[in-house]
Image (cartoon, helix red, strand yellow):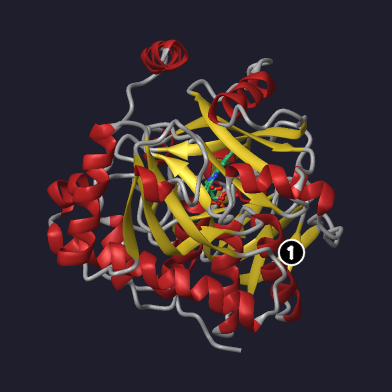
């Protein structure tokens, strides 16, 4: 077993002095396609009594599991605490889109971070896409990976933006995997009158994120990572090692990663002030006939439109359409969300006459004001990762890898992300009023 030394204080921010209090947000119930159709996950026991590990990971989503896996591969002992069940959060309820880059536009990133840093971040995400496919291959994970992704333009302005992005990616980022599709070419992939054109990316696409997560967890089990479910972490107290407290047990560790994302609450303003949990909605239809699929998505690509809050859809296992849309800035699940999804599908594809929404659910997205991930350290021993802003299937795995590297003493990649500056959100009640207005504007739109 590798010996993990605590870093000296000069190497990192100051050590912990006071207790950090933690809570968790319970995921909404809903009828989840992924959970209903995957092989049953193993049940892990509740944390009881005292345990030791080099690193304690709080949160059993893609970020926590990725970090645990990378650390365990390096011989570090890891304990992972999950408040409910592994994959009950965003990682087991997202749209499964494997998309390159970030939620934030590249030009905006270049203005904020400079071109060189933006290019490095882009390339890191791009190469992590390859790592995901490598994981799928090496571990034989059956997670319905499909290639081919289209960013669809709703109007000529968005089409011009896509053309500029295509040029920029090719000339400045040396990224040659995209093709601009004008309206008539788009028609070969996507049969709707809605879009003016699109940008096709051949390496992006989709996976079943829950099956992928299950595949990674299977690896954790073979590496003796201690996994505990139904064990919400309640506090972290200081000491020569940190102690993570749950209701019936404790874990002592040198380092802690807070990977609870939108489902974690924490009394540290550093985390609470920089991101908000917003809810987003996904539905899955009854199986569609082959003829129906041909009439809407003849090339079986995965699609997201270019609106700030996009509609996104694809055909998934069992010939069903998965459709995601909308946001509630107050983190609520409006009663009408199923109706909204159905009507969006009908508006886009009026030719789709016979389908029901068999599954529908909501999930919390941790969103930052600049739509870039918020990664860092509360002190020299506690790391955190949140704020993937609806773009975390690839990013969460990458960030998990970078945090594990930082814990092991190679913090280059981690620092690139942790240097990103995030604006503070206003305190309550101003925050609630602002979010209420944002909600209203979104509804009107
Ligand atoms: C509806 C929806 C659709 C999305 N679609 C896409 C998409 O198509 N493509 C894309 O790239 N991204 C998408 N995302 C975003 C993506 O799913 C997330 O960025 C990513 O899954 C975040 O992973 P995570 O591990 O950080 O958080 P999560 O998967 O949310 O995991 C956090 C875990 O921590 C646990 N936890 C919280 N507090 C505690 C505590 N105190 N103690 C112990 N455990 C705790 C929670 O129970 C949860 O299981 C979507 C998100 C949502 C909600």
**Would residue 40 be visible to someone looking at this image?**
yes
Question: Local crowd at mark 1 within 10 Å, few (<14), some, or many (≥20)?
Answer: many
Q: Quadrant of residue 9?
A: bottom left
Q: Position of residue 207 (x, y in %)?
A: 61, 59
Check disc 1 and report the residue beneath it.
227
The x, y position of residue 323, in whole percent, is 61, 38
Q: Is residue 233 visible?
A: no
Residue 296 lies, with reference to residue 156, above or below; the image says below
Q: Nearer the viewer, residue 23 or 219?
A: 219
Determine whether, in the image, residue 404 is placed left or right of residue 12: right
Could you tell me residue 221's position as x and y percent? 75, 74
Q: Quadrant of residue 117?
A: bottom left
Q: Nearer the viewer, residue 275 or 40?
A: 40
| Residue displayed at 30% across by 62% down | 122
Give SS at disc 1: strand
Mark 1 sits near ligand 1, with its Cβ under 8 Å away: no
Quadrant of the frame with the C terminus: top left
Which quadrant is the N terminus positioned in? bottom right
Q: Nearer the viewer, residue 84 or 257?
A: 84
Left or right of residue 188: residue 101: left
Q: Is residue 58 above or below residue 342?
A: below
State left or right for residue 36 relative to residue 216: right
Q: Count the marks.
A: 1
Position of 418 compared to 304: left or right? left
Horizontal and vertical percent position of residue 69 = 60, 73
* Location of residue 23 by image quarter: top right
At x 39%, y 56%, the residue is 200
In this orientation, which residue lies closer to the viewer: 328 or 270?
A: 328
The structure residue drawn at horizontal position 17% and vertical position 53%, both measured from the top left corner, is: 113
Which residue sits at x=34%, y=37%?
196
């Amino acid at each position: 077993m590798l010996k993990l030394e605590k870093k000296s204080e000069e190497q990192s921010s100051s050590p912990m002095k006071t207790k950090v209090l933690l809570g968790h947000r319970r995921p909404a119930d809903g009828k989840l396609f992924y959970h209903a159709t995957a092989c049953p996950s193993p049940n892990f026991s509740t944390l009881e009594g005292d345990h030791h590990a080099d690193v304690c990971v709080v949160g059993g989503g893609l970020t926590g599991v990725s970090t645990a896996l990378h650390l365990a591969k390096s011989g570090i002992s890891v304990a992972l605490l999950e408040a409910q069940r592994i994959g009950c959060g965003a990682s087991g309820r997202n749209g499964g889109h494997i998309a390159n880059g970030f939620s934030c536009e590249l030009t905006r990133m270049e203005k904020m971070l400079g071109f060189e840093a933006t290019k490095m971040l882009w390339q890191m995400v791009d190469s992590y896409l390859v790592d995901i496919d490598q994981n799928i291959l090496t571990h034989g994970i059956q997670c319905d990976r499909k290639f081919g992704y289209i960013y669809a333009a709703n109007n000529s302005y968005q089409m011009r933006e896509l053309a500029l992005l295509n040029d920029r990616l090719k000339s400045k980022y040396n990224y040659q995997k995209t093709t601009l599709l004008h309206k008539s070419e788009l028609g070969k992939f996507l049969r709707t009158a809605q879009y003016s054109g699109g940008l096709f990316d051949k390496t992006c696409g989709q996976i079943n994120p829950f099956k992928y997560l299950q595949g990674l967890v299977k690896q954790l089990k073979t590496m003796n990572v201690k996994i505990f479910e139904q064990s919400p972490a309640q506090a972290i107290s200081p000491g020569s090692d940190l102690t993570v407290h749950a209701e019936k047990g404790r874990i002592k560790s040198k380092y802690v990663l807070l990977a609870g994302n939108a489902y974690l609450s924490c009394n540290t303003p550093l985390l609470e002030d920089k991101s908000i949990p917003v809810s987003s909605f996904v539905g899955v239809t009854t199986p569609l006939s082959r003829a129906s699929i041909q009439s809407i998505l003849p090339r079986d690509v995965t699609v997201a439109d270019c609106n700030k809050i996009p509609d996104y859809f694809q055909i998934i296992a069992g010939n069903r359409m998965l459709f995601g849309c909308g946001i509630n800035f107050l983190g609520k699940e409006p009663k009408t969300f199923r109706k909204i999804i159905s009507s969006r599908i009908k508006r886009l594809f009026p030719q789709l006459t016979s389908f029901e929404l068999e599954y529908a659910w909501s999930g919390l997205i941790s969103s930052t004001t600049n739509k870039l991930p918020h990664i860092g350290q509360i002190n020299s021993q506690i790391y955190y990762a949140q704020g993937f802003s609806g773009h975390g299937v690839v990013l969460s795995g990458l960030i998990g890898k970078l945090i594990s590297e930082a814990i092991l003493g190679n913090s280059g990649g981690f620092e690139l992300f942790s240097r990103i500056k995030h604006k503070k959100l206003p305190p309550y009640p101003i925050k609630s009023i602002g979010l209420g207005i944002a909600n209203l504007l979104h509804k009107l739109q």
